[in-house]
Amino acid sequence: MKKEKKFKNKKTKDSIPRLKTVGFSMLEMLVVVAILGMLSLILYPNIINSLETRDLESTSRDVLTYLHTAKFQAVKMKYNHRVRFSNQPGYWVYRIEREESPGEWNRVVEYPEKSINRKFNVTVSLPNQCIIFSPLGYISNFTVNQNRVVIQSPKLLSRKQPDLRILSVFAGGSIQYQKSQT
């Protein structure tokens, strides 16, 4: 006869199934948080500069687009069109107007009035604070000394970044866009 071995199900220390630990220790998490904190402190000024630069660019390009729109509308409709700037308390607004009859200017409702964020310093150096485009696309109220709109960001100025966007108009109807630093 064969001897049967009886196996007892003895539980020993080594036979207990262990749970595999998954995750990170508290020390590892603190190191990662500290590294992220240092990176954000280092990169914060660059992020702020980028956002401010984008905002200044966007605002300046909006004004430039509006000027081009007025010029194209003047040529298309065969009427004088102007972009009129007006200084409201603390900010500037601009709109397109059409000269329906001599001396009678009406707002072009297809192009709503826009404003320039009050955080920017704006200098409008134009005759009667407007640019008038003739039906040929020329500037009919051009003067050499009054031919520009300057938009400045005080934040970029304080960080010694290019802080000015200059829109200069010329008698032939062309518009120059420049970036510069004061």
Image (cartoon, grey):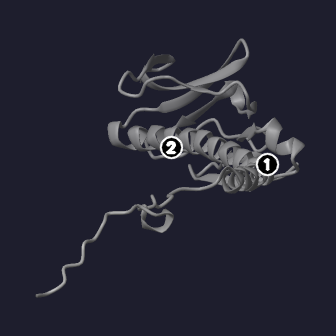
Determine whether the residue tagged by mark 2 lies in a helix, strand or loop. Answer: helix
Q: Residues within 10 Å of mark 1 (few under 14, many from 20)?
A: few
Give the labeled residue for mark 2. Answer: 65
Q: Is residue 57 left or right of residue 41?
A: left
First in sequence: mark 1 or mark 2? 1
Q: Picture coordinates of residue 154 (x, y %)?
A: 82, 36
In the image, 29 versus 151, the foreground residue is 29
Kind of residue at disc 2: Thr
Determine whether the residue tagged by mark 1 lies in a helix, strand or loop. Answer: helix
Q: Is residue 115 left or right of residue 70?
A: right
**Residue, far top:** 89
**Residue, far front:** 1
Q: Picture coordinates of residue 146 (x, y %)?
A: 76, 38
Q: Picture coordinates of residue 15 (x, y %)?
A: 42, 66
The residue at the point 68 percent across, 26 percent down is: 129
Give the labeled residue for mark 1. Answer: 41
Q: Residues within 10 Å of mark 2 (few under 14, many from 20)?
A: few
In the image, 61 versus 28, the foreground residue is 28
The residue at the point 79 percent across, 46 percent down is: 163
Q: Is residue 88 left or right of residue 77?
A: right
Q: Which label number is shown at residue 102?
A: none
Q: Picture coordinates of residue 160 (x, y %)?
A: 88, 50
Q: Is residue 33 left or right of residue 136?
A: right
Asked if residue 85 is positioned above or below residue 28 in the image, the reply reads: above
The residue at the point 64 percent across, 54 percent down is: 25
In the image, 34 versus 1, the foreground residue is 1
- Is there any visible trace of residue 118 in the rendered image? yes
Kind of residue at disc 1: Leu
Asked if residue 86 is positioned above or below residue 65 in the image, the reply reads: above
Mark 1 or 2, which is nearer the eye?
Answer: 1
